[in-house]
Image (cartoon, helix red, strand yellow):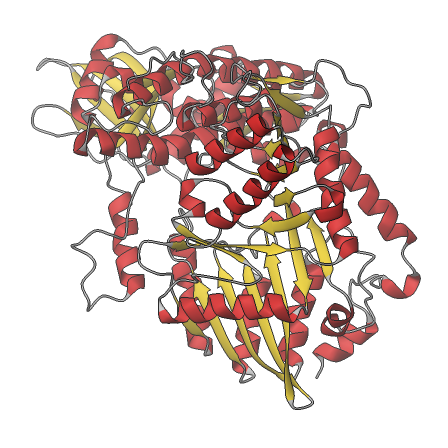
Amino acid sequence: MIVNYDKTGVTTMAGNIYDNRELSWLKFNQRVLQESLDTTVPLLERLTFTAIFQSNLDEFFMVRVGTLFDQLLTDPELRENKTNMTSREQLDSIFARVRKTEPQKDKAYRDIMKLLEKHDIKQVSMDRLTDEEDAFLREYFRAEIQPVLSPLIIDKRHPLPFIKNKELYIAVRLDSKSGNKIGLLPVSERIKRVIQLSRRPFRFVLAEDVILKYASEVFENYSVLEKSIIRVTRNADISEDDDSLLDNDFDFRDVMEELIKKRKKLAPVRLQICGATGSEMVKYLCKRLEISENQVFSASAPLDLSFTFMIKSMFETSKPELCYMHFAPQHSPAINENRPMAEQIRQKDIILHYPYESIKPFIRMLNEAAADPDVVSVKITLYRLARNSKIIQALVDMAERGKDVLVLVELRARFDEENNIGWSKRLQNAGCTIIYGPPGLKVHSKLLLITRRRGGRLEYITQVGTGNYNEKTSELYTDLSLLTANEKIAAGALEVFNALSLGSLVKKSDSLLVAPLCLQSKVIEMIDEEIMQARSGNKAYIGIKINSLSDKVIIDKLAEASQAGVRTELVIRGLCCLISGVKGKTDNIRVTSIVGRFLEHSRIYIFGTKQRRKVYISSADFMTRNTVKRVEVAVPVYDPDIKDRVVNIFETLISDDTKARIQGSDGMYRRKSVRRKNISAQDTFMTEAIEKAASAPAERKPDDSGFSDFYKSFLMQ
């Protein structure tokens, strides 16, 4: 059946409950952009939200748009399974939406920069330089910039050179006796991007604007007809399934290194232009890049806004009013700094809530395990890691102390492949056993198992998390990390690691939900239980917090639950292909999205009312790629206190009436119309973490150095 659709990606058929995945993601990125417009957000934070919006969109074009172009080449009639749109229809709708939102980003940037002028921070327009600034920049260009430029002429004899992904170039149309030519100036990474004109007030220009202004000095033998800044985005949708690479003689690391090289050379999917560019240059560039003019996007704001993070860092101390109030992850009152972590976990399960609570206890647990002579083995899955990872160092220490350390390193973590290849080599050189995920399936689970021989028997500590083993993101992303000595959970973790070691999959687990074979089906079973309860006249409830929802099997089952009368609350930060509030179909479902200071990353599944409630935390979103195409793990929360805490976290998010947006039956998101309590969930969690850390008994707190006397002596062993 062919279904009509509009430019929002929502089908026009009455009672439709599906939204298009790609266009729903663009709605999410629009919510990110809205943070740059929110006057309650400090100015420099608003500025960086424009950069986050832009960076998100870059990756969207590289991955999702790139995938759609690939589909267009291989199967142009293939239709998406929810809104029935072809790849071409999706691309046309994407381009229309982006063309509408890009000017909003440009205006947000201009407005914020105008407001920053009142705080003595000003980006100076190149046509408004003082005579002294003009003279300074001309000399700066000649002395510091021009010597490292590599100008190129493009004509019939000289083809367009390879234009690197996301890098800035100055394109100049030149008049000469032999006809029009194109001049190209790569903006080298060796050139300082932000050029300071004065300190107080802080006045600056961007290097690409300086090169644009003085480009005629480089092409002095030509007459410059027009010039602009350009930026190309390339397809980054690579796959390790390339038959030419999967030779049995290849190490998988070698395969991934070849694929990374291949990615850098993939086809362009977008051309961005900033500056006065006529149709002749645009047509020329499109022809040479082999793209359509529909893939060209004009902008007035800088094409690369990453420099805004540097601007913010420059003034965090001197102008704190322009940034969020400083917050450091707090000590968890559940943890006693003067007792070994394993001893505390054996006594009672512990959960850490990042970034409100510190990741340090988890790292302490690893370091203690390295020093503990009774620990015989450690098994862990790694997906994304911090640049100077203390977790890697702890694993290296374990291996060098003779412990059996098994590390699954996911080399296919997109855009972290090179980092993970390097980490895998370092771990292997230290004596760790390195394994990779099953062919065609990324291992996205966050799972750790520590085995200790004590008194003639084996004991286990298991950690299951919703986020990566990454100290940096633990201060920026909201995540949950469960530490438990529960033997049933340990048995489930051991099943996962044994399967991964043998290249097989877990088909059944008595404790964990494990994708790809026994997570989606178990979720459906628990939804069915709520449907049965509702049809029997009992109260039924489903609460889900995830990043994204696109799995049609789960969407259809949630709609069925709604029609049976199951009250369903979904907290979904990103894309959501289910439309809530559709009369008679999804009117018992409410979808909330929260975009704020921290990136909402934790996944929580709640099934049932209080008396029979099941609670899980997980690494898996409800996307087909997670539920049936990756290795993911969800762990049940057994401890009653922790279960209540996880439910309270979820209920606080649902109560947010400051940063929350509610999805309407038209698929659009709006802030709550009435703010009853002025609750910001993230502010609430920060306040609670500070208060609880302050009220914890003194013996439970870390000393001023961050390490207890016990911990120091333990590490000296």
Classify residue 67 as left or right of residue 677. Answer: left
Residue 167 falls left or right of residue 240: right
Is 670 drawn above or below residue 703 in the view shown?
A: above
Q: Given the current orientation, which residue lies at the most extreme bottom position?
A: 456
Q: Is residue 660 visible?
A: yes
Image quadrant occupied by the N terminus = top left
Image quadrant where residue 35 sits: top right
What percent of the width, then of the height, locates residue 459?
A: 65, 79
Residue drawn at (62%, 14%), measured in percent from left and top?
114
Which part of the image, by quadrant, shows the C terminus?
bottom right
Q: Could you tell me which residue is drawn at 64 percent across and 43 percent down?
A: 607
Side of 349 where 218 appears, left or right: left
> Residue most toward the front?
536
- Nearest to the observer: residue 421 or residue 21: 21
Q: Position of residue 712 (x, y in %)?
A: 76, 74
**Nearest the eye: 116 or 138:** 116
Q: How many marks?
A: 0
**What residue appears at the point 72 percent right and 41 percent down from the top-left corner?**
609
* Residue 253 figure quarter: bottom left
Among the 4 quarters of the image, the one containing residue 94: top left
Q: Observer-nearest residue: 671 or 112?
A: 671
User: Relative to the observer, which residue lies in front, 132 or 437?
Assistant: 437
The answer to whether residue 327 shows anywhere in this view is: no
Q: Is residue 677 above or below residue 167?
A: above
Coordinates of residue 111 in the picture (x, y in percent): 60, 13
Vertical placement of residue 348 versus 539, above or below: below
Q: Which residue occupies 56% across, 41% down? A: 527
| x and y, in percent, of residue 147 in the image | 34, 36
